[in-house]
């Protein structure tokens, strides 16, 4: 295929194809117009117009260039950063206040990113971090239910005000996309399983309420130039996580301590980190997304089965104990993954817990 390249412009596969299809090499005047238009739009980080028969249509640059990841030192954020820096055309900025995140999570990527230790609630810091960004992955948050309800002020100020600050700064900086990591907690106790994106938002706790509020700001600040994309994550698991059910169970099992289930009747949807990364990146890059999208495995896992499986793979002598249920927790969730599969192309696994052993290889018993 003939390729027409404009120096300094991240060239999309679509643009390559179009250049070949329209025979631009043979048409110097059109090429020169297209090249100068492309350069101008790219420098201003605006969409590039694509000449097709019957008029001009907008296309996006195929590769991302400047990217801000808030919460990039955390569990999911640091894996995302590793993935993004693997493409050397990406310039990645990470903003994290290290409240839960760790710079150690970024050790493999640190020399290829700009790391800003700062708070998303601080307007000047956010404005500096988002400068010239085309795409924002907004992950920074008070990221769990119990933490959010025990510190209502922090979860509100970070998840609502902080999200507003990131959105506001992204719009002002001319970013074109923002992926917002919402949660299955926005649904509260579902009426039926699996839960589709059209289910009512009825959060049961402060964490879910703060994520629902963030979603609403994404909705009202969306425009033709700026598209926030909302992904509602199920229970994500992978290396670098701590203080959530899978790392807690693994730690208890490896120390031969009892595995404690609160209530014991939970049915949850565990999704492997790699599937989530795929979903996040596709959410940022696909042309059309119908609205918020669940990201999950689409499979129900009884918590008791998870506990038994952890005991099995660790060869532990632990027993499984039941403590009283915690009222604020949503005990039943399975994602309807129809939209995830169709719009993001993220397939669902046969065995949602198939990667447990991979975590075990990297598990630090002392820290969990
Ligand atoms: N892990 C899951 O199962 C799950 C499920 C649903 C949604 N989510 C959402 O996905 C995102 C990432 O989750 P995670 O599991 O990686 O959590 P995490 O706690 O590991 O990462 C969140 C990061 O945000 C940072 N942070 C917190 N407050 C901040 C502030 N005010 N300013 C700047 N940085 C701040 C933390 O230091 C941390 O590094 C969060 O928005 C979370 O709510 C996660």
Image: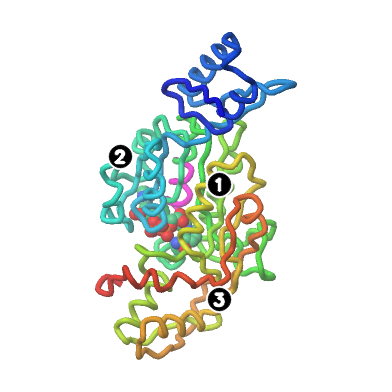
Q: Do the residues labelled 1 and 3 touch (CB within 8 Å)?
A: no
Q: Quadrant of residue 212?
A: bottom right
Determine contact: label 2, label 1, CB under 8 Å.
Answer: no
- Residue position marked by numbered label 2 in the rendering: 114
Magenta segment: 156-165
Q: How far from the left and from the top, in percent, is residue 27?
A: 60, 12
Residue 351 in sight here? yes
Structural crowding at the residue carrying mark 2, measured as other residues with C-alpha within 10 Å and reported as few (<14), some (14–19) or many (≥20): some
Residue occupying image coordinates x 34% and y 38%: 125
Which quadrant: the C terminus?
bottom left
Disc 1, SS = helix
Mark 2 / mark 1, whichever is N-terminal: 2
Dividing the picture into quadrants, the one containing residue 249 is: bottom left
The image quarter in which residue 118 lies: top left
Give the camera-side residue of 161 and 183.
183
Question: To which residue does mark 1 refer?
Answer: 283
What is the distance, in whole Å, between disc 2 and disc 1 at their CAs? 23 Å
60 vs 82: above or below: above
- The numbered dot on residue 301 is 3
Secondary element under disc 3, as helix, strand or loop, is strand
The overriding secondary structure of the stretch rendered in magenta is helix
Let me know if residue 157 is in the magenta part: yes
Where the N terminus falls, by quadrant? top right
Marks 3/2 in contact by CB < 8 Å: the verdict is no
């Amino acid at each position: 295929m003939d390729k027409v390249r404009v120096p300094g412009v991240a060239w999309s596969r679509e643009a390559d194809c179009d250049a070949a299809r329209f025979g631009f090499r043979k048409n110097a005047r059109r090429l020169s117009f297209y090249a100068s238009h492309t350069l101008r739009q790219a420098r201003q980080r605006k969409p590039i117009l694509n000449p097709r028969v019957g008029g001009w249509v907008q296309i996006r640059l195929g590769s991302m260039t400047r990217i801000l990841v808030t919460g990039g030192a955390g569990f999911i954020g640091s894996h995302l950063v590793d993935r993004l820096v693997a493409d050397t055309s990406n310039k990645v900025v990470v903003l994290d206040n290290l409240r839960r995140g760790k710079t150690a999570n970024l050790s493999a990527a640190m020399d290829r990113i700009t790391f800003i230790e700062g708070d998303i609630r601080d307007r000047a810091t956010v404005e500096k971090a988002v400068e010239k960004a085309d795409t924002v992955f907004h992950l920074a948050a008070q990221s769990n239910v119990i933490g959010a309800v025990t510190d209502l002020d922090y979860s509100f100020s970070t998840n609502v005000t902080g999200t507003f600050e990131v959105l506001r700064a992204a719009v002002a900086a001319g970013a074109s996309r923002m992926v917002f990591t919402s949660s299955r907690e926005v649904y509260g106790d579902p009426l039926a399983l699996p839960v589709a994106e059209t289910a009512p938002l009825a959060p049961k706790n402060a964490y879910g309420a703060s994520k629902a509020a963030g979603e609403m700001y994404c909705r009202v600040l969306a425009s033709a130039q700026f598209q926030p994309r909302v992904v509602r994550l199920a229970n994500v698991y992978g290396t670098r996580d701590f203080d959530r059910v899978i790392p807690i169970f693994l730690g208890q099992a490896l120390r031969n301590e009892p595995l404690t289930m609160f209530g014991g009747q939970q049915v949850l949807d565990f999704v492997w980190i790699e599937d989530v990364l795929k979903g996040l990146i596709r959410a940022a890059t696909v042309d059309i997304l119908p609205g918020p999208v669940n990201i999950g495995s689409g499979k129900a896992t009884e918590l008791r089965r998870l506990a038994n499986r952890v005991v099995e793979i660790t060869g532990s002598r632990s027993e499984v104990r039941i403590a009283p249920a915690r009222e604020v927790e949503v005990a039943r969730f399975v994602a309807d993954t129809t939209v995830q599969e169709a719009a993001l192309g993220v397939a669902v696994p046969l065995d949602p817990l198939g990667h447990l052993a991979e975590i075990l290889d990297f598990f630090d018993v002392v820290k969990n």
